[in-house]
Image (spheres, helix red, strand yellow):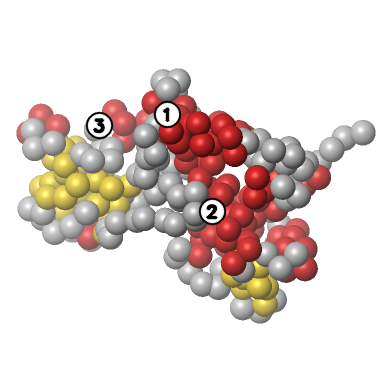
């Protein structure tokens, strides 16, 4: 008998995620992340993020609505309920703690930890979660700068803007980088454009062209990045 991902249940020691499937957790996590940019979240945006058809997503959203984990309006989109947000935040906490643990304790490159955490987040017990958090000193952010939700579901995030918005001559500190593209992460790591790095905009090419930046204030570390990449780097 083949068990589909949608049918896999969390182990009985999984705390607040007991009784929710991996598919349910994945959907709630994606809706939560997309809500940070747009509310309600369009069905098409969820389908694009998960690589599923609109029909399949709509079916799952009706299921989540029946479980009272989301409020779903067919023509307007979807939003998490309080119960749905609680589950999403717990999954995200698992994911981001695991990412940091894999980097700090196991020395895994930061461009590989997102994929590994995607698997492990669904089987992490509350006991191991707390042991990891304690070992790491109860961190507030993962290796890419994303905030780690607290055990109570609280999220402490700092105000930021994109690097693309910084005027020429402006010097900022990198807060967050995108974590879904391993090739981009490897490149950012190579040039030192990582969380906490100081970055100055030296020149901006016209017509939405690339940015010339200096990382760490050293002339030898001057680089040129596309506007698209600059828009995805959060600075403060």
How many angstroms separate mark 1 from mark 2 (CA)? 21 Å
The residue carrying mark 2 is: 89
Would you place residue 167 above or below residue 77 in this image? Answer: above
Left/right placement of residue 79 relative to residue 230 reads: right
Q: How many marks?
A: 3
Query: Hey, which quadrant is residue 215 in on the image?
Result: top left
Q: Position of residue 136 (x, y in %)?
A: 39, 31
Q: Looking at the image, which is closer to me, 63 or 220?
A: 63
Is label 3 in a helix, a strand or a loop? helix
Q: Position of residue 183 (x, y in %)?
A: 42, 33
In the rendering, which numbered label is found on residue 191? 3
How many angstroms separate mark 1 from mark 3 (CA)? 29 Å
Would you place residue 29 above or below residue 71 in this image? Answer: above
Work out whether mark 3 precedes mark 2 in sequence or the reverse, and give the earlier one: 2
What residue lies at 10% left-to-right and 29% top-to-bottom?
A: 220
Left/right placement of residue 134 relative to residue 67 reads: left
Work out whether mark 1 precedes mark 3 in sequence or the reverse, and give the earlier one: 1
What residue lies at 61% left-to-right and 68% top-to-bottom?
A: 81
Residue at the farthest top position: 106
Is label 2 in a helix, a strand or a loop? helix
Crowding at label 1, few (<14), some or many (≥20) Cα neighbours within 10 Å? few
Query: Hey, which quadrant is residue 185 in on the image?
Result: top left
The residue carrying mark 1 is: 135
Is label 1 in a helix, a strand or a loop? helix
Where does the N terminus fall, quadrant-wise?
A: top right
Work out whether mark 1 precedes mark 2 in sequence or the reverse, and give the earlier one: 2
Q: Looking at the image, which is closer to me, 53 or 100?
A: 100
Circle 3 or circle 2, nearest the eye: 2
């Amino acid at each position: 008998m083949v068990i589909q991902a949608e049918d896999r249940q969390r182990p009985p020691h999984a705390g607040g995620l007991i009784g929710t499937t991996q598919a349910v957790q994945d959907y709630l996590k994606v809706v939560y992340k997309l809500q940070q940019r747009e509310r309600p979240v369009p069905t098409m945006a969820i389908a694009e993020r998960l690589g599923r058809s609109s029909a399949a997503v709509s079916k799952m959203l009706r299921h989540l609505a029946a479980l009272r984990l989301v409020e779903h309006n067919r023509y307007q989109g979807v939003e998490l309920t309080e119960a749905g947000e609680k589950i999403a935040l717990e999954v995200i906490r698992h994911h981001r703690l695991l990412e940091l643990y894999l980097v700090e304790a196991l020395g895994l490159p930061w461009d590989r930890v997102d994929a590994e955490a995607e698997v492990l987040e669904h089987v992490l017990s509350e006991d191991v979660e707390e042991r990891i958090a304690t070992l790491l000193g109860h961190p507030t952010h993962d290796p890419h700068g994303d905030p780690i939700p607290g055990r109570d579901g609280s999220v402490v995030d700092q105000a930021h803007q994109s690097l693309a918005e910084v005027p020429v001559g402006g010097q900022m500190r990198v807060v967050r980088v995108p974590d879904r593209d391993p090739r981009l992460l490897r490149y950012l790591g190579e040039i030192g454009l990582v969380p906490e790095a100081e970055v100055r905009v030296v020149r901006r090419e016209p017509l939405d062209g690339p940015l010339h930046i200096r990382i760490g204030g050293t002339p030898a570390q001057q680089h040129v990045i596309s506007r698209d990449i600059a828009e995805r780097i959060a600075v403060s």
